[in-house]
Amino acid sequence: MERIGITKLLCVVVGMWIAVTVSMGFVATGNFKVVGPEDLRDSAEIYEDIPGPEEDGERYMALRYIASELNRFFFAQYDKASLALGGASLLLLLMAGRRRGLELGIVLLGLAIAAISYFYTTPLMTDLGREIDFLPRNPEKPAKVEEFYQYHTIIIVAELAKVVLLGLLTLSLLRGRRSE
């Protein structure tokens, strides 16, 4: 028999998991937006000793490096939160006494994506990112930069799939509640 209070808490935890995932997307893209020399207030005075705002200039590369390091830190923290929320979701799902295999499968898949990110892709992207931080991007991108963006695309697709799956899980949890 399903425990309704635990299912409600599960909905909250899954909602938090979705929110943390979506928020990380905004943080990761926002870091690069706000460090653009043209977007920083008083950047000309602050960075006057660092040559040029052009794309391959030292100022641009230094600011991109800062954004990259911030993202590396935030992704490491995000991975921990995602694993914790996924683990809590699994525990609550089991405690709720729900017997839907699809719900369990979604939680396990979301947890697998979080674990792969924590143990494999984030460390890989951190290492690759540090290798390419100061490589010139013009006239063409080096092979390591292309490799980084290939992994980046896979990660984005996996995270988007996770959000969609968690949304479907939430709908299933809510639908199951209404049918009782």
Image (cartoon, rainbow, N blue to C red):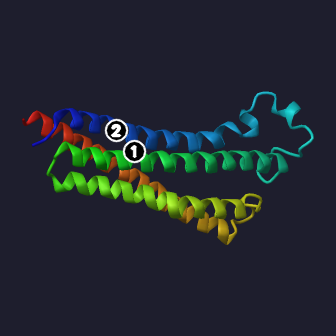
Q: Looking at the image, which residue sits at the far front?
A: 95
Instruction: Note whether 29 is above or below 40 in the view shown.
Output: below
Mark number displayed over residue 16: none
Q: Which mark is residue 85?
A: 1
Q: Nearer the viewer, residue 159 or 180?
A: 180
Amino acid found under the numbered disc labelled 2? Val
Q: Is residue 34 above or below residue 90?
A: above
Q: Residue at x 66, y 69 (%)?
A: 144
Looking at this rendering, what residue extends furthest in the left direction? 180
Q: Is residue 6 left or right of residue 124?
A: left
Q: Residues within 10 Å of mark 1 (few under 14, many from 20)?
A: many
Give the Cα distance between marks 2 and 1: 6 Å
Task: Please state if 59 lies on the left or on the right of 99 as rendered.
Answer: right
Q: Give the percent coordinates (x, y) of residue 26.
A: 53, 39
* Relative horizontal placement of residue 73, taking residue 103 as reference (left or right): right
Q: Residue at x 39, y 42 (%)?
A: 17
Quarter of the image with the N terminus in it: top left
On the image, numbered disc 2 is attached to which residue? 13
Of labels 2 and 1, earlier in sequence is 2
Question: What residue sits 27% from the left and 44% below the top?
Answer: 92
Residue 69 pos. (x, y %): 68, 49
- Residue type for callout 1: Leu
Tell me the element at label 1. Answer: helix
| Nearest the eye: 163 or 150 | 163
Number of numbered markers: 2
Image quadrant where one finds the C terminus:
top left
Q: Which residue is most to the right?
A: 49
Q: Mark 1 and mark 2 in contact (Cβ < 8 Å)?
A: yes
